Image (spheres, rainbow, N blue to C red):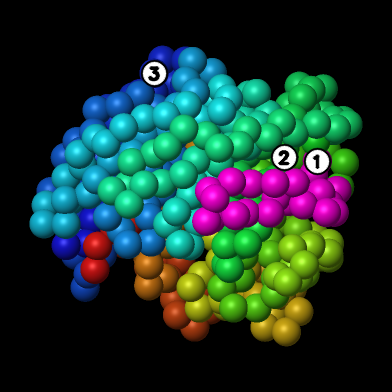
Amino acid sequence: MSCAYVGCYTTPDRDGRGRGIGVYRVDPASGAWTDGRLAAATDNPSFLAVDPGERHLYCVHGGDAFSRVSAFAIDPRTGDLRFLNAQPSGGRNPVHLAVDPTGRMLAVANYTDGTVAALPLAPDGALGPPTAVLPLAGATGPHPVEQTRPHPHHCPFDPAGRFVVVPDKGLDRLVVYRADPARATLAPHDPPAVATRPGAGPRHAAFHPRAPHAYVVNELDATIAVYAYDAARGTLRPGQVVSTLPPGATGAATGAELVVAPSGRFLYASNRGHDSIAVFAIAPETGALAPAGWTATGGRTPRFFTLDPAGHRLYAANQGSDTIVPFRVDPHDGTLTPTGAAIATGSPACIVFAGA
């Protein structure tokens, strides 16, 4: 059974109106979501991850009051979740987590305390205690409010699972760690980091599925930076920088999420404030981006969005207006068309899929 899991903010300090992790049945033909129900009543499941075998789901609990990661087993017949255990995340306000391609370790980014942690995963999906907690340090960016200390915001593994790239919003850096899945740990890489433009505030990173390109959405200046990625050496070389906003856009806006389509032909990025999804075509050889359009998300504050596993539909999680809005993806130019549907849920913060 194909399921969509939605993590929703629950606490007043995060303007949370959700109840925890919801689960929906996904129709493989139409993409419609039905049979929505609460799968786990838990505090601020602000980011979710599923293991490669799609048997286990993990979540971090966002907010300064929390510093833990939770593990759940997925029932393959019903999609229900069974709580397995929780472990310390290695710092306050864990904002992202990622499972390595072998399913043996978890990386976690702790925003408030400025640390990145590694946790082992047992064969039954349970979490072990952290094997490494690595503090980030360095000169902060120029923003007087958002860049007063290190703020790691994302920690994806590269496609081979050899390196973890951590965009640090506070330090204007992409910090790189070597991953050792066999020992379920992380270690600083050499060179340890690449600098972004001052004040960019790097937030999330994504790798091209087949070509040696990586992309970073910068929160504070609402841009996307293109990098040449050397998978053998784990190095990033900066290149093109493009705005996530259309020409002439006015008003405050911040970059939030980005996704590379499974085809590798298109990249999508969300704008909070402007409340839109930007679409870019990717040049196959260079990885350069060319704008293909902007589409309103049909709600407020698209902190998160994702594509379905086939790349046929995009789902925008409008955290500020309590809706998830689906769009059809044009296979030729990547542009988006609203389906006319909207899924009501409180403060959606993350969506992941599991099942065939």
Please say if 141 is above or below 314: above
**Residue 183 falls inside the magenta stretch:** yes
Indicate the quadrant where residue 148 lies: top right
User: Going 24% across and 45% down the picture, which residue do you hit?
Assistant: 73
Which residues lie in the magenta part? Answer: 172-196
Q: Nearer the viewer, residue 222 or 189?
A: 189
Position of residue 105 measured from the top left corner of the image (x, y, whole percent)? 48, 49
- The quadrant of the image that shows the N terminus is bottom left
Q: How crowded is the residue under tag 2: few (<14 C-alpha within 10 Å), some, or many (20+)? A: many
Instruction: Identify the amino acid type marked 2.
Output: Asp
Residue 168's label in the rendered image is 2
- Cα separation between marks 1 and 3: 29 Å
Q: Is residue 140 visible?
A: yes
Is the Cβ of the residue at disc 2 closer than 8 Å to that at disc 1?
yes
Question: Which of the two discs, 2 and 3, labels the residue nearer the N terminus?
Answer: 3
Mark 2 or 3: the one toward you? 2
- Cα separation between marks 2 and 3: 25 Å
Q: Which residue is mark 3?
A: 11
Position of residue 112 measured from the top left corner of the image (x, y, whole percent)? 63, 24
Please say if 66 is above or below 159: above
Instruction: Identify the amino acid type marked 3.
Output: Thr
User: Going 77% across and 52% down the picture, which residue do you hit?
Assistant: 189
